[in-house]
Amino acid sequence: MKLHKSIVAVLVCLVALLLPIGGNAAKLEKTAPTSVGIEPKQFMLMYDSLMSSDLTEIHHVVVLVDGKIAGELHPKPFRVEDRHTLYSVSKTFVAVAVGLAIDDGLISVEDPFVKYFPQYINDSIDVRLRDIKVKDMLTMQSGFKTATSMRNNQEHWTDFYLTRPLVADPGTKYSYDSIETYLLSALVQKVTGKTVLELLNERIFGPMGVTDVEWELCPEGVNVGGWGIYMSSHSQALFGQLLLQGGEWNGKQLVSREWVKEMMSVHVVRDANDYGYQIWLCEYPGAWRADGAFGQYIIIVPQKNMVVVLNQCSRSKGFPERSNIWHTVVKNALNCAIDAKPDELKELAEYEKNASLPVLKGDKSSAVAEKINGKTFALDKNKLGWQSVKFRTVGGGYAMEVVDAEGKKSTINLGFEDWAMSQLAGYPHYSILAKNRFAGVTGPFYTGSCYAWNADVLDVKIHYVNWITALKLSFKFDGDKVEINVSENYPSKPFVIQGKRK
């Protein structure tokens, strides 16, 4: 038998009070999962599976049903208000910006791309360059040989790419290429006189009340397009909801319904997931996803009127996490209210409130601790760009002072059996080495960190909570010397940093 509506309302309020609030939460109403046909235990199964995986670290999970938050998880040290870099999820935002330019009659998908860059048309170019259409860029079928690494050593990205020979006829061969999305960003800027972000702020994010979006810029002042968008999980969910609603928001068509339908249609049939315009068809029926490196997703499920946002740092290529989301919450959503379960709802709310990534295990102190207290170690040139580290005791715990390549000093507090928060003076560690990286993205950036002694080795874990990356550092002290073994949370080879006491 159904509970009285007033009781359901009370339970919804209870869940809302126990859930974290921040970021754009005021623009997203919360609801009990049972009110939208999801058993609380399905959320618990999803969270447990995601959090227990050795292949990933979960940062943010947000599930919208009927435009309301039915569940969300932001395990400590991550917080609901923290923004996240999204890698190739950015591509789907570029596709929407292209749609705005098409809606305005400024371009067409059938237009030759170089029509808008006539300076590159000459006798020395590959003649097939004239045949690349805008839609070929949208579907990753330009014919260019992928050269993403050029972003690490080139100042003029457009010039570099549009003067290269092609390796396939345009429109005939799919080849995933982030620089093609960059070129679409450059195209939008060329025809509108605005960067993609400026255009989206004006036409999409502004009307939606989203104010926390930034985007990296290339050396030419163009939003990098294929990666680099930076925003909170709630803002991602709102964008997913916009696509779910066919581009309509509060009765206004922000981007044409026809364009959203075209984006979320199969244009390239592949052995794995099919591809639309800068967005992927999911494994499960009728669902689409914006997809970024290390498992960043905005998943749109029209059958369930659902949007799922997942931010993480995964070493699994993401499929296990997507499968888990499908087999727990998505597949079992009933699209109608079910009996409220007060005890289960309370248990779920407590889980969401108290979730935490695992802290390091070990001892609080060591015989070595006093020997390094207040000592500064100069470091050899290293991948982190750190010049020196210094440890000091703070309130029974530790703080690590780091001087970076620019001479900026950050004090990183280290919690024992808990996460301690700190504000950086500079930038977080980043997996991308592109020129101009972080341009267009402002701080401050924060860390959540912990430590533990294991024998005479000091282990430290640093999460850059409003970014994506994390570092595990093991400090081994030998007289005036230190050796630091470093591993990153994304797939990469561990490395060693040597240092000596100043």
Image: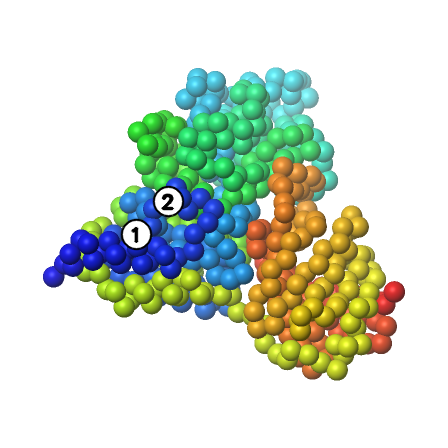
Amino acid type for the residue under numbered disc 2: Leu
Q: Residue at x 65, y 35 (%)?
A: 218
Q: Nearer the viewer, residue 499 or 261?
A: 499
Residue 252 in view here: yes
In this rendering, is residue 315 above or below 361? above
The circle on residue 28 is 2
Q: Image quadrant of residue 18?
A: bottom left
Which is more toward the observer, 479 or 97?
A: 479
Measuring from the top left, give residue 348's x and y in whole percent.
Answer: 34, 64
- Left or right for 130, reference 108: right
Q: Secondary structure at mark 2?
A: loop
Q: How many numbered discs sit on the rendered protein? A: 2
Would residue 291 be visible to someone looking at this image?
no
Which kind of residue does numbered mark 1 sit on? Answer: Thr
Residue 355 position within the rendered picture, expressed as x and y whole percent measured from the top left:
45, 65
Check disc 1 and report its element: helix, strand or loop.
loop
Q: Circle 1 is placed at which residue position?
A: 31
Quarter of the view holding residue 450: bottom right
Q: Nearer the viewer, residue 369 or 170?
A: 369
Residue 63 left/right relative to 80: left
Residue 290 spot, x, y in % from top left = 44, 44
Which residue lies at the image location 52% right of the left edge and 39% below the top edge?
213
